[in-house]
Structures are given as C-alpha cells and as structure tokens.
Image (cartoon, rainbow, N blue to C red):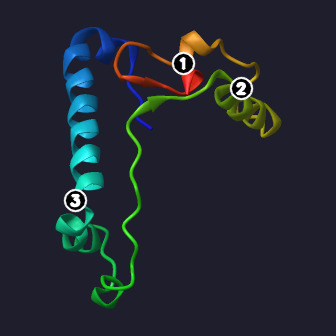
Amino acid sequence: MLAASARALAQKGSEIAAFYRAYDDAVNEVNANPETYREAIVSGCDFPPAVSSLMQIPRFRHAFLPAETQVNDVSAWMIQKGLVNRTPLYTDVVAQGYVAADARTQ
C-alpha cells in the first residue's frame, strides 16, 4: 500500500504514476526470471542464507486499487476499534489513475 496526500498527488502525480509503472515492470521481470533474483530477495529480506535453496520465490502481483468492499471492511474495523467515526467515501481515500489494475474489475 502506498499512501499519498492530496498535495503530493497534485504536485507529484506523474512521479507517483511512474513509480507504479516501474514497480509493475519489476514484477514482470521477477515473475519471468525468479531464479535470477533469488539471492537479491534472500539478502534484501535478510533471510538466513540456508533459506535460499529451500525458499519458493512467490509470484508477485502488479499494483492495483483495492476493491470498495475491502476499503469498507477496513473502515468498519477502524470504527469498531474507535479509530474513526464514520466510513469514508471510497473516492475520498482511493486515488484513481495512478495504477493500471483495479481490483474492482478483476
């Protein structure tokens, strides 16, 4: 999850969209060649070296927008915990137009 203020979206929207494109490119590369990135994943995540040969490299997902039901479920949990008073509108907490995939259409 990436959170950005309205100000950041307004001032750096193209950079945020570029970040997501780069992330998706990296997902494509790792998913196509997982063994090439095994050591980088193991060392980058600070796993013990013995894990390297045992670990199955997961298939990574592209960046995507959460479904409205997911946002509502999190909001309900936050209300239950007393963290917020009301469920926000989906469009108030999810900025569209920065990622290629949308969970609502998958």
For the point 38% across and 38% down, which residue is it?
62
Q: Determine the residue positioned at 78% across, 40% down.
A: 81
Of the residues shown, which amino acid type is indicated by label 1? Answer: Val
Q: Is residue 89 left or right of residue 46?
A: right
Residue 91 in the image: above or below residue 87: above
Q: Nearer the viewer, mark 3 or mark 2?
A: 3
Q: Which mark is residue 93?
A: 1
Q: Quick check: 24 above or below 17?
A: below
Residue for point 75% across, 19% down: 86
- Does residue 31 appear left or right of residue 78 in this picture? left
Label 2 belongs to which residue? 72
Q: Residues within 10 Å of mark 2 (few under 14, many from 20)?
A: some
- Rendered location of residue 55, percent (x, y): 39, 78
Q: Which residue is more in the foreground, 59 or 87?
A: 59
Q: Tell me the tag on residue 34.
A: none
Disc 3 residue type (three-letter): Asn
Residue 1 percent coordinates (x, y): 45, 38
Q: Alpha-carbon neighbours of circle 1 within 10 Å: few (<14), some, or many (≥20)?
A: few
Query: Can you tell which quarter of the image residue 50 is in?
Result: bottom left
In the image, what residue type sits under mark 2? Asn
Q: Which residue is mark 3?
A: 33
How many numbered marks appear?
Answer: 3
Closer to the camera, 46 or 85?
46
Residue 49: x %, y % from top left? 27, 87
Q: Is residue 84 left or right of residue 39?
A: right
For mark 3, does the 10 Å Cα neighbourhood hold few (<14), some (14 to 19), or many (20 or more) residues? few
Reading the chain from its start, which is encountered first: label 2 or label 1?
Answer: 2
Q: CA distance from mark 2 to mark 1?
A: 11 Å
At mark 2, the secondary structure is: helix
